[in-house]
Image (cartoon, rainbow, N blue to C red):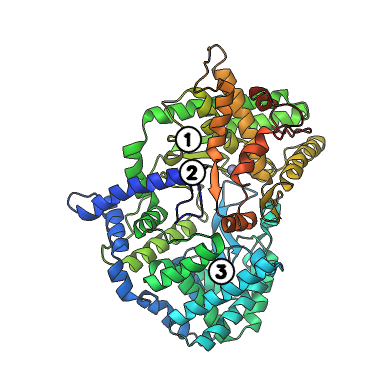
């Protein structure tokens, strides 16, 4: 940690962030080449090369100023009645990312029947990163809300509003967002899938928000025939309706203007980019400097045309040997989990059988998708950055909405191949390891097994354990939200999970803020289970081998050092403060220290004595 200070353009710095930056630098080379050498490019290479070229042409972007927003602002200006809002929102939702404008609307697998994709209407409408920013009353939260108000005001001034008008507009937006925030579930409440499952028909949805004409919205979104919806947070929609009824048309227009400029700030001229950075990165996360433009542009290509870029990435970096090695390690860790389940003392035979069925149904996706996304319909030009962003955004929105009523595509990935991360999806019941995460120093083919199992093995075990964490365990082998636990086993799980919740609740994140361990519960359980499973798999893999000490460490010590290097990181205090609210993962320090205190194997490997800091009296153990 001492040798790796945080770079000035980063909120924190660890192995994952460093590797992500290395990948970005590598992709920069590919994109720069495709942007300059335009002959002989295939259609996907044309798109990513020209997107990157247009994004990098900062002088053109700066000359345009806020001009790319004009069509949107004109439409907002032209609103003469609230009844025109549904049609406008359907269009704006498809042209902007996320759920910033009043609410979110998309598609997902039905919790009750994972073979079906249905429409999802979600809570949204906020500018700050979480509803807690609006509701907390401590001094720091009050200060951040003041700074947010000033930021919204300055953005309006950049659009040409007079300062006093801009200030009034910011105040009215704060009031509306605060009302929506108060009606939104907390992150902890949102972790519980039952809280987010409210299947309704059009009549029922219309009853939740009578003043918003859903028929018009759906028709404009191309979903006129739909009659099945999951409204994740009905109480939110009631409050949304209240806001739409009581707010003036001018307030609504200002709210729309704010979210239009907010969602597009990164694609506009430097004054918008800098103001956006100043609040969302510098103030909220403590980052001193804006990332250089090339990093932002590489990031945007990855976000908007990620599988076209990913194809270039994997053809240069990911070998069949790597895929094979990961597959082997994954099946070893699955085997370790099967053995572990069979030997559990707290789970009865009936639940064990269901757990094993679920375990054996988990699909392993490694490296990149079998079938690449087809970007044929996205028009990309080398001199129209804002237009490229909009067309790629509309493509993605339509792609998501088009899935409604279609069979689930189980080959789909929700991370791009260069991503340095991995995930488990409870409705797909699959684990996904992008090529970007299967690289040194996380997985290093030149190293011995001990650090590789401690590091990448731990990650594989982590994703697998997510299928059996406090929320993942509520989904069955097919990915349906369906209870497969006996009452007794359910109770045994809960009391063991409570041990983890109580352990992490004592750890300090920064200043006087402790871990919200009901938020991090699933990740903490996955971390612990992952390391234990990786240890078992490593022991099994090397059982007939004589292992030697290296670099002054025993093989067992090297296993734990490998694991520690996975989450070793430095963080800015502001970023820790934000993560304490928004991040379901514990800070890196406790993702390591919080695990090993539960493992007698660690105590033995480092000859720890009772009473020393890394020896815990009541160890937690679930899986
Ligand atoms: Zn996780």
Coordinates of residue 451 in the picture (x, y in percent): 52, 28
Q: Decide: few, some or many residues near mark 3? Use Cα within 10 Å; few <14, some 14-19, many ≥20.
A: many
Q: Earlier in the sequence, mark 2 or mark 3?
A: 2
Front residue (pair 295, 322): 295
The numbered mark, 1 or 3, whose residue comes first in the sequence reads 3
Q: CA distance from mark 2 to mark 3?
A: 27 Å
Cα–Cα span, label 1 and label 3 = 35 Å
In the image, taking residue 492 as reference, residue 579 lies left or right, namely left
Q: Quadrant of residue 590?
A: top right
Measured as percent of width and height from the top left, residue 266 is found at 42, 66
Residue 377: % across, % down = 33, 58
Tell me, yes or no, whether the two marked residues, 1 and 3, touch with CB atoms within 8 Å: no
In terms of image quadrants, where is residue 596?
A: top right
- Identify which residue, 380 or 115, lies in the foreground: 380
Q: Which residue is mark 1?
A: 442
Which residue is drawn at the image coordinates 69% and 45% (left, top)? 521
Mark 2 nearby-residue class (10 Å; few <14, some 14–19, many ≥20): many
Q: Which mark is residue 127?
A: 3
Left or right placement of residue 132 versus residue 502 in this view: left
């Amino acid at each position: 940690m001492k040798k790796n200070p945080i770079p000035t353009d980063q909120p924190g710095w660890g192995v994952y962030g460093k590797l992500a930056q290395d990948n970005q630098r590598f992709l920069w080379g590919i994109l720069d080449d495709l942007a300059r050498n335009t002959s002989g490019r295939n259609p996907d290479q044309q798109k990513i090369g020209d997107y990157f070229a247009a994004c990098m042409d900062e002088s053109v972007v700066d000359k345009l100023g806020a001009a790319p927003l004009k069509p949107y602002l004109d439409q907002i200006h032209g609103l003469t009645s609230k009844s025109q809002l549904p049609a406008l929102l359907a269009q704006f939702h498809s042209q902007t990312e996320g759920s910033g404008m009043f609410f979110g609307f998309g598609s997902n697998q039905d919790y009750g029947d994972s073979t079906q994709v249905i429409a999802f209407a979600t809570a949204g409408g906020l500018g700050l990163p979480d509803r807690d920013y609006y509701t907390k009353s401590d001094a720091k939260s009050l200060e951040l809300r003041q700074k947010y108000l000033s930021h919204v005001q300055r953005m309006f001034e950049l659009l040409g509003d007079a300062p006093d008008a801009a200030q009034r507009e910011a105040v009215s937006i704060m009031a509306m967002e605060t009302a929506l925030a108060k009606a939104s579930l907390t992150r902890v409440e949102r972790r519980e899938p039952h809280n987010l499952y409210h299947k309704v028909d059009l009549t029922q949805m219309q009853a939740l928000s009578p003043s918003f004409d859903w028929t018009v919205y759906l028709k404009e979104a191309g979903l006129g025939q739909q009659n099945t919806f999951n409204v994740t947070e009905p109480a939110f929609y009631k409050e949304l309706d209240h806001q739409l009824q009581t707010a003036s048309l001018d307030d609504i227009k200002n709210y729309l203007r704010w979210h239009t400029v907010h969602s597009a700030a990164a694609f506009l001229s430097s004054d918008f980019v800098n103001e956006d950075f100043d609040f969302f990165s510098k103030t909220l996360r403590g980052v001193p400097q804006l990332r250089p433009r090339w990093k932002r542009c590489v990031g945007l290509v990855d976000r908007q045309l990620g599988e076209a870029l990913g194809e270039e990435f994997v053809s240069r970096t990911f070998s069949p040997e790597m895929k094979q090695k990961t597959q082997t390690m994954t099946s070893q860790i699955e085997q370790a989990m099967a053995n572990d389940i069979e030997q559990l003392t707290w789970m009865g035979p009936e639940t064990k059988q269901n757990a094993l069925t679920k375990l054996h149904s988990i699909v392993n996706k490694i490296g990149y998708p079998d079938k690449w996304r087809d970007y044929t319909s996205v028009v990309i030009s080398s001199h129209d950055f804002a237009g490229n962003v909009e067309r790629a955004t509309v493509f993605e929105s339509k792609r998501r909405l088009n899935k409604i009523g279609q069979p689930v595509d189980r080959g789909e990935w929700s991370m791009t191949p260069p991503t340095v991360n991995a995930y488990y999806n409870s409705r797909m019941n699959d684990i996904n390891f992008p090529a970007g995460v299967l690289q040194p120093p996380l997985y290093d083919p030149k190293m011995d097994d001990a650090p590789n199992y401690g590091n990448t093995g731990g990650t594989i075990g982590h994703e697998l354990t997510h299928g059996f964490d406090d929320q993942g365990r509520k989904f069955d082998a097919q990915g349906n939200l369906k209870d497969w636990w006996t009452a007794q086993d359910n109770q045994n799980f809960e009391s063991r999970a409570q041990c983890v919740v109580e352990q992490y609740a004592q750890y300090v994140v920064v200043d006087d803020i402790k871990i919200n361990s009901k938020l991090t519960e699933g990740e903490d359980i996955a971390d612990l289970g992952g390391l234990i499973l990786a240890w078992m798999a490593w022991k099994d893999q090397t059982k007939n081998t004589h292992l030697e000490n290296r670099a002054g460490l025993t093989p067992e010590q090297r296993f734990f050092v490998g694991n520690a290097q996975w989450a070793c990181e430095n963080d800015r205090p502001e970023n820790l403060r934000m993560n304490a609210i928004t991040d379901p993962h514990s800070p890196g320090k406790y993702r390591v220290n919080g695990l090993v205190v539960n493992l007698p194997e660690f105590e033995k490997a480092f000859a720890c004595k009772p009473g020393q800091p890394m020896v815990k009296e009541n160890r937690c153990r679930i899986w």
